[in-house]
Image: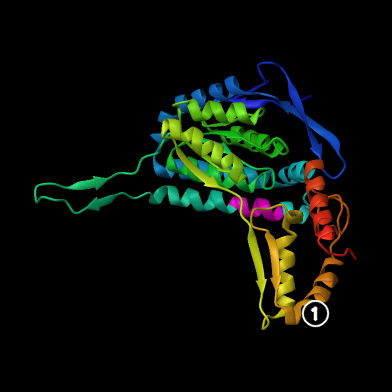
Amino acid sequence: MAKQMYINGEWVSALNNKTFPVYNPATSEIIDYVPNGGYEEALQASKAAANAFPKWASKLAEERANMILKFRDKIIEHKNELIETLCLESGKPILEADSEINAGLNFFTWYAEEAKRIYGDIIPASASDKRIAVIKQPIGVVGIITPWNFPFNALAKKIAPALAAGCTVVIKPAEETPLTAFKLAELAEKTGFNKGVLNVVTGNPKEIGEAWLQDDHVKLITFTGSTEVGKILMRGAANKVKKLSLELGGHAPFIIFEDADLEKAVEGLIASKFRNNGQTCVCANRVFVHENILQEFINKLKEAMNQLIVGKYDEPNVTTGPLINKSALEKVERHVQDAVNKGATIE
């Protein structure tokens, strides 16, 4: 049975009853189907979040903090299930998935505590009979759009601060990895959040994003993903002067000078470049090595790379999972061919 979206405390199918498959990238097998929603479902979710907002925002900071900690504890209680889900849909090895969830749990702990420390300001006034006070208040409904490469951590770092501030949320996870988001919604429901505080919509990313850009209920959109999509969101947000929080792509260099400790340099490059099989926004994209140490560095790097074991997440000693889909594989193959065409050799 296909998964359902979580809107206003209810598990619902897409209005058109259509679904799309979620694949295990290690085997290309279909592991589940999820609703192929769109514009109308996105509006239903944001309306539900808007209706839930006044009650959630009016809670004492300590009450919100306690609920977030209760949510965190529920996640810890079901951590093994989350690891299994995350591994299946993203292909990550178990240790890497475990590390991601641990990092995400820290966000819930941190922002639960920060909820109680949202202080205002007293600003020096322009006259002796005036006092200027700044009171910080929740902005309203927050639209959350996350990437596939960190199905749990990317959600945690957006959900936790939004709830801590008193905002309600609508979530659109990546099409490749929506099952972790559904699992989080299940745990939010078990935690006891009021209907509409947290909602999850899956389906057509263009329609869902457009709905939240146009809907006045959604006061802020937070997005992690490509620079190209970030530009689209910026253009759309400008029409409504809607606030945005964007974490976009980069092109990070890894620079190794002549006096570098090569053992540490190799260790650092392996950790950076091969995290999630190179599929993160902070992975090194280019490596610059001083010519006087180039060959020695290459030799040490080859030794380290030979220790990596690529495979399915539940196979023994696996260190590196698969690329997320066929498109990612083809992109890597194009990069390799381009390098060979320009003089590189494959060993």
Magenta stretch holds residue 101: yes
* Residue 182 x, y percent position in the rendering: 67, 34
Q: Residue furthest front?
A: 342
- Asked if one can make out residue 69 in the rendered structure from this viewpoint, the answer is no
Examine the image and state in which quarter residue 292 appears: bottom right
Residue 326 or residue 68, whichever sits in front? 326
Quadrant of image for the N terminus = top right
Q: Residues within 10 Å of mark 1 (few under 14, many from 20)?
A: few
Range of residues picked out in magenta: 98-105
Residue 48 vs 25, above or below: the answer is above
Residue at point 57%, 54% (across, down): 106
Residue 93 falls left or right of residue 77: right
- Write the residue at 69% across / 16% down: 16
Q: Is residue 237 shown to the viewer in this render?
A: yes
Q: The residue under label 1 is which amino acid type?
A: Glu
Which residue is depicted at the point 90% across and 66% down? 347
Where disc 1 sits, the SS reads helix
Q: Position of residue 169 (x, y in %)?
A: 52, 34
Residue found at the very far right of the displayed protein: 347
Q: Position of residue 235 (x, y in %)?
A: 50, 36
Residue where numbered disc 1 is placed: 296
Position of residue 174 relative to residue 114, above or below, is above
The residue at 83%/64% (across/down) is 343
Please identify the dominant SS of the magenta region: helix
